[in-house]
Amino acid sequence: MLREANTRDADALVPLMKTLGYPTTAEKMRTRMERIFSKEEYQTFVWEENEKLSGMIGMRLSYAYHTDEPHVRVIAFAVNEDSQGKGIGGKLMKAAEQWGKANDATTVMLNSGNRKEREATHEIYRHYGFEGTATGFYKHI
């Protein structure tokens, strides 16, 4: 079942963050969620089955200098390995699109690493209708 996330989900989100390559603790996750949930331009949906979270998508409504319309930037998107292939990711992505449309967004964007181990994930994104159009650069400051 799709639902909005809440801070009580912090413990259950820890393994999902690990699948993304970002190990964390429940305490850190709870702090992050409290910070994120205090901002109305953020939204997080989870997929729950049998009282267990099997997927999540976290996003932000953003504006840019090169366009008049807002866009949705997916920040985190994960489905537990044992739940993959069941359509959960597609339902989460559809929820992101619907949330974006409800907020007048015309585009959904996401970043994914340009690494060999991400190629299968990139195919999934293409299946969802995404086009690979950019390479991101990051610098720690």
Image (cartoon, grey):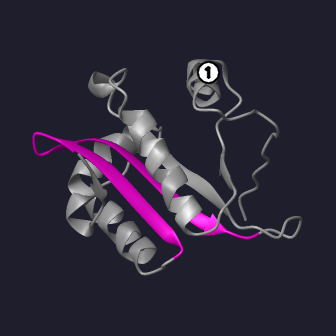
- Number of labelled discs? 1
* x then y, percent, for residue 84: 35, 24
Left or right side of 70 for 20: left
Q: Is residue 44 above or below residue 41?
A: above
Left or right side of 77 for 49: left
Q: Is residue 141 above or below residue 132?
A: below
Q: Per the image, is 54 magenta?
A: yes
In the foreground, 112 or 57: 57
Q: What residue appears at the point 35 percent right and 42 percent down from the top-left corner?
A: 16
Left or right side of 108 for 34: left
Instruction: Please rate how many residues cluster around mark 1, counting C-alpha atoms within 10 Å: few if below 14, some from 14 to 19, many from 20.
Output: some
Q: What residue appears at the point 60 percent right and 67 percent down from the top-left corner?
A: 61
Q: What residue appears at the point 42 percent right and 76 percent down from the top-left corner?
A: 35
* x then y, percent, for residue 119: 63, 20
Q: Is residue 83 above or below residue 23?
A: above
Query: Dividing the picture into quarters, in which one does residue 121 lie?
Result: top right
Query: Dividing the picture into quarters, in which one does residue 125 lie?
Result: top right
Q: What residue appears at the point 50 percent right and 55 percent down from the top-left corner?
A: 98
Q: Can residue 22 be seen at all in this image of the molecule?
A: no
* x then y, percent, for residue 8: 20, 64
Q: Is residue 39 above or below residue 68?
A: below
For the stretch drawn in magenta, the main secondary structure is: strand
Magenta-drawn segment: 41-63
Pointer 1 residue: 123
Q: Can residue 118 be seen at all in this image of the molecule?
A: yes
